[in-house]
Amino acid sequence: MIERDRIEEAGWIIANAKYGVVFTGAGISAESGIPTFRGEDGLWKKYDPEEVASIWGFRRNPRAFWEFSFELRNKLFAEPNPAHYAIAELERMGIVKAVITQNVDTLHQRAGSRRVLELHGSMTKLDCLDCRKEYDWSDFVENFEKREVPRCKACGSWYVKPRVVLFGEPLPMDVLEQAVEEARSADVFIVVGSSLVVYPAAELPYIAKSCGARMILVNAEPTVADHIFDVRIYGRAGEILPRIVEVVKSLKQNS
């Protein structure tokens, strides 16, 4: 009963919003089979992030980075889940104006979201750090199938890196500035599947709150920022968000 009430409250807030913004983290993609980084079964329990996910670790030992990345290769083969499609539906309804994501898997785009701000980059593009030649993921399919470290086809460098933000690298400033502006513009800010502990991304909900947005959290478990949310719903986003969308549709039809 409590969950249903919260879903209806969230639906009412969203249905009456004029500028909705969604912020997503690894939790939304976990339901598509992509492992999370933190938590009980997170990848950081198995790997040292300093070694496999930092720019200095990559420079020191690109093979360690790629062995870690091969475990994540399903990022490009996973499929969007109902939570991704629900967010895209809210955009089609004209409520959600932007999706800000910490994920690099492009699942939002494949679900139909059009305005997606990727704070941590994307796995679909790669760059040679030595000669700056750009590649698509498809350029190294044979390497990845054989779990071979890719090598630049132009200069022979081993420092071919996916266009993702590693520890020790700054977020793309243009994307971060757009995300901050979206947070300031939002009259409802919806957080889905994020632990809200990675900064500066985790500052965005506080910015939205300070600018007067109504705040909704859909997450598997409580976060350190729960106190700033008007509605908190714990559980699987793929089950909760479609139910919220149905409430929004019903309210819109009856208004």
Image (spheres, rainbow, N blue to C red):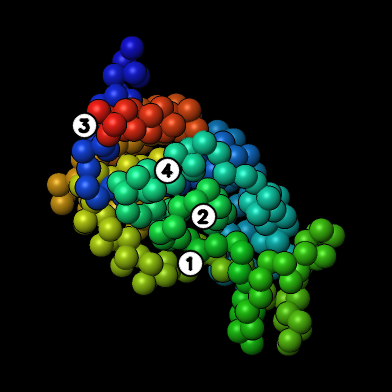
Q: Residue at x 76, y 82 (%)?
A: 153
Q: Separation of disc 1 and disc 2 at Cα?
A: 27 Å
Would you call the spot at circle 2 few (<14 residues within 10 Å), some (14-19), or many (20 or more)? some
The residue at the far right in this view is 146
Residue 56 vertical position relative to residue 4 in the rendered view, above or below: below
At mark 2, the secondary structure is helix
Corner quadrant of residue 124: bottom right
Q: Separation of disc 4 and disc 3 at Cα?
A: 19 Å
At mark 4, the secondary structure is helix
On the image, numbered disc 4 is attached to which residue? Answer: 89
On the image, numbered disc 1 is attached to which residue? Answer: 168
Q: Separation of disc 2 and disc 4 at Cα?
A: 12 Å
Q: Position of residue 146 (x, y in %)?
A: 85, 60
Q: What amino acid is at disc 3?
A: Ser
CB under 8 Å between callouts 1 and 3?
no
Left or right: residue 140 compared with residue 58: right
On the image, numbered disc 3 is attached to which residue? Answer: 255
On the image, numbered disc 2 is attached to which residue? Answer: 109
